[in-house]
């Protein structure tokens, strides 16, 4: 199991290029099921989750090849309608094949999803929507078994916005007869990216990026050639890295508009940020100011940046309140940050962070993907050496992260164990 070792205290300087968004690439890969033929997806990050999705599509009978940042998918023949537990247990996004398989073949059998242990993420809203579109659902032995002779449009209201639920039902609706309305839909940029990819396949979709999405079903879709958007969470992570190290970093190949809520909060802490349409320059201050955050669905502050922002606040002047409104178990990084000298107290869904003069290097353990990133940020700012164990979480969501930090001057290396 690999570890990452960081000698803290180096001011980051230079340029870093952002990879394609994992959370946009995965649903677009699943969408390729809907069109028979060869699909090409560009700007795909080389990550463990991408490999897992590729293997899952291969199990369904599709051809899959990933080279550099280009994924080529052959979907002429779907030979299996089952996504087994062995594939799905490591990655929750595997549930995204449920809707496309059902829409194309009339049947799908998908294991209940796994992924990071950051709280319950039920798929009852996916199931509710499929049932409204005419599917019969059987839950048995840890699997969702869906069948439909013919899918039809429906009005589906989400009790709470769900990203994967919105994506799954949007894909299903593209081949359903009639019109589907998704109300209280998720508005994340990844939703818009998937809608754009589906439209390039011949789908009829309006309203993606708003709370109401309208899909008019079509008789068939063609393969796609599509370029994935830059990863806004990786962008935010490198913004924070520059801020926490008093750095001067230029972030290339990004979309500042997708990180607007986070950029706004960083500015309030005293960070200097200038940007154009695809580049951000960020300069960290000599002394950060404490700011409160509350995680919210997009366009609010993203839950996937909560851990990184908390790491930043550990050395800010004053006290900050960090409230997690999306997942009920997303403070697992707190214990590890406290090992490094952070002053954090948790009460319910709120963490109170009192800034300290400095963090100290320590052996710590990653508990999930974004917690891993927060520990790297803390290690970059700390005095002494930090060793992060269980960094396989990082490989699910950050492409060559230690190499990117190294090119910015960080003293960081991966230890093969």
Image (cartoon, rainbow, N blue to C red):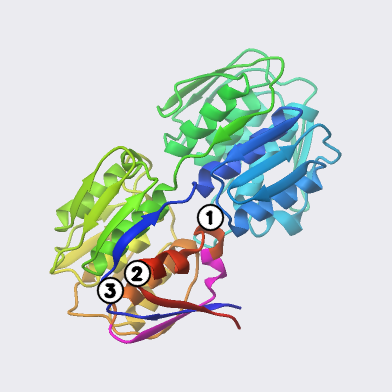
Q: Position of residue 392 (x, y in %)?
A: 57, 69
Secondary element under disc 2, as helix, strand or loop, is helix
Mark 2 or mark 1: name the one nearer the start of the chain. Answer: 1
In the rendered image, the vertical position of residue 239 relative to residue 225, given as above or below: below
N-terminal label among 2 and 3? 3
Q: Give the image location of residue 178, x and y in percent.
A: 63, 12
Q: Residues within 10 Å of mark 3 (few under 14, many from 20)?
A: many
> Label 1: which residue?
120
Between 196 and 265, which is closer to the camera in this rendering?
196
In the figure, is residue 21 to the left or right of 154? left
Query: For this view, does 141 lie left or right of residue 165?
Result: right
Mark 2: give few (<14), some (14-19) or many (20+) Cα within 10 Å. Answer: many
**Residue tagged 2:** 377
Residue displayed at 22% across by 80% down = 358
Q: Which mark is residue 199?
A: none
Please identify the quarter of the rendering in which residue 289 is found: bottom left
**Farthest residue in the top direction?**
178
Q: Position of residue 326 (x, y in %)?
A: 41, 50
Separation of marks 3 and 1 at Cα, in angstroms? 24 Å
Q: Which is closer to the viewer, label 3 or label 1?
A: 3
Marks 2 & 3, CB-CB < 8 Å contact = no
Distance from disc 2 to disc 1, alpha carbons, whole Å, reads 26 Å
x and y, in percent, of residue 165 in the image: 56, 38
Q: Which image quarter is the N terminus in? A: bottom right
Q: What is the span of residues highlighted in magenta in the rendered image? A: 383-394
Whether residue 351 sits left or right of residue 372 in the image: it is: left
Q: Residue at x 65, y 30 (%)?
A: 130
Determine which quarter of the picture holds residue 386. bottom left
């Amino acid at each position: 199991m690999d570890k990452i070792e960081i000698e803290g205290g180096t001011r980051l300087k230079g340029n870093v290029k952002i990879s394609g968004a994992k959370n946009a690439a995965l649903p677009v890969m699943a969408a390729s099921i809907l069109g028979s033929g060869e699909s090409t997806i560009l700007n795909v990050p080389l990550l463990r989750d991408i490999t897992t999705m590729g293997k899952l599509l291969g199990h369904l009978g599709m051809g899959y090849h990933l080279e550099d940042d280009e994924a080529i998918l052959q979907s002429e023949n779907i030979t299996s309608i089952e996504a087994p537990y062995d594939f799905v247990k490591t990655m929750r996004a595997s549930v995204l094949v449920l809707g496309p398989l059902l829409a194309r073949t009339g049947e799908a059998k998908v294991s209940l999803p796994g992924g990071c242990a950051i709280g319950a993420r039920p798929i009852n809203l996916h199931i509710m929507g499929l049932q409204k579109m005419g599917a019969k659902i059987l839950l048995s032995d840890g699997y969702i078994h869906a069948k439909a002779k013919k899918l039809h449009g429906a009005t589906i209201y989400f009790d709470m916005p769900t990203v994967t639920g919105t994506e799954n039902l949007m894909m299903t609706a593209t081949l359903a007869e009639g019109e589907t309305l998704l109300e209280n839909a998720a508005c994340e940029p990844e939703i818009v990216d998937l809608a754009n990819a589906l439209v390039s396949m011949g789908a009829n979709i309006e309203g993606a990026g708003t709370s109401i999405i309208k899909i008019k079903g079509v008789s068939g879709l063609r393969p796609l050639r599509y370029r994935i958007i830059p990863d806004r969470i990786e962008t935010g992570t490198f913004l924070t890295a520059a801020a926490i190290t008093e750095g001067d970093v230029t972030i290339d190949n990004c979309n500042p508009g997708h990180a607007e809520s986070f950029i706004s909060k960083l500015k309030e802490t005293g960070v200097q940020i200038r940007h154009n349409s695809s580049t951000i320059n960020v300069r960290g201050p000599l002394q950060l100011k404490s700011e409160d955050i509350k995680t919210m669905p997009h366009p609010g502050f993203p839950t996937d940046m909560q851990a990184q922002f908390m790491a930043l606040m550990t050395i800010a002047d004053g006290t900050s309140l960090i409230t997690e409104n999306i997942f009920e178990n997303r403070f697992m990084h707190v214990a590890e940050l406290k090992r490094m000298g952070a002053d954090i107290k948790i009460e319910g869904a709120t963490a109170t962070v009192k800034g300290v003069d400095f963090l100290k290097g320590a052996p710590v353990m990653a508990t999930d993907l974004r917690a891993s990133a927060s520990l790297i940020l803390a290690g970059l700012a700390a005095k002494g050496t930090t060793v992060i164990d269980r960094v396989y979480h990082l490989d699910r969501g950050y492409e060559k992260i230690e190499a990117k930090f190294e090119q910015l001057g960080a003293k960081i290396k991966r230890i093969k164990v």
